[in-house]
Image (cartoon, helix red, strand yellow):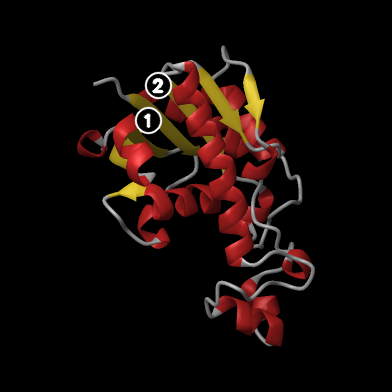
Amino acid sequence: MKTYTLYMFRHGLTRGNFNAQYIGHTDYPLTTDSIESLKKIKAKHHYPTVEAVFVSPLKRAMQSADIMFPKNNKIVIDNFIEYNFGEFEEHTAEELKDNEDFQNWIHGDIYAAPPFGESNAQFAQRICEAFEKVINGCIAEGIENIAIVTHAGVIMTILACYGLPEAPMAHWQMDAGYGFKLRITPSLWMRGNKLEVVDTSPVGIKNEE
């Protein structure tokens, strides 16, 4: 039976990451150090060869994809953009700790949202709708090796919704420049919208030093 291979990678870091800020739609570029870190990962482990690369529209994802997959054209998926943090954008948890809206949101209600931002439910819905379109399109076109370069929250949401083994979002955390290798079996995908997480990438978990 024909299967498809999907790789999902988290982009490199921006100064917002280093400052522990909530950075969603703010379009920070990668830091110089992060660019060098991605190049070192690539030189040591090598990113896989793929036929199609889908990417968030933000600079940090686009720059990372250019380093990881320089020979591939990048297909921008607008709805793979990071969470809309609204008024929480560019603030830290410490700065927001006394904010009532922040307290309601951080406690995990999927319908709570930052002012002028999106709720966890809205975020998951747009990510899942975009992801299903990408996967269904690749299966229809017979594109067997696929990469997605996007944000940690996007990847964790996808794997929490579709990944096997089933696990909560926190289980799928990854370092910048790293991610997961998945196997798509069309019958399993069409029957239950599930994908098998088979390893980490660009280096297998058993081979990590």
Helix, strand or loop under label 1 = loop
- Quadrant position of the C terminus in the picture: top left
Q: List the residue tagged with mark 2.
A: 46
* Label 1 packing within 10 angstroms: few (<14), some (14-19), many (20+): many
Q: Are marks 1 and 2 in contact (CB under 8 Å)?
A: yes
Disc 2 residue type (three-letter): His
Helix, strand or loop under label 2 = loop
Q: Is residue 30 visible?
A: no
- Quadrant position of the N terminus in the picture: top left
Give the residue drawn at x 49%, y 43%.
Answer: 176
Give the residue drawn at x 74%, y 65%.
Answer: 117
Q: List the residue tagged with mark 1.
A: 202
Give the residue drawn at x 76%, y 65%.
Answer: 86
How much space separates mark 1 and mark 2, taking CA atoms? Answer: 6 Å
Q: Is residue 164 visible?
A: yes
Of mark 1 and mark 2, the one earlier in the sequence is 2
Above or below, comparing residue 15 to residue 204 in the picture: below
Q: Nearer the viewer, residue 15 or 185?
A: 185
Above or below, comparing residue 122 to residue 129 in the picture: below
* Label 2 packing within 10 angstroms: few (<14), some (14-19), many (20+): some
Disc 1 residue type (three-letter): Pro
x and y, in percent, of residue 138 in the image? 49, 24
Above or below, comparing residue 137 to residue 118 in the picture: above
Left or right: where does residue 175 sit relative to residue 62? Answer: left
Quadrant location of residue 198? top left
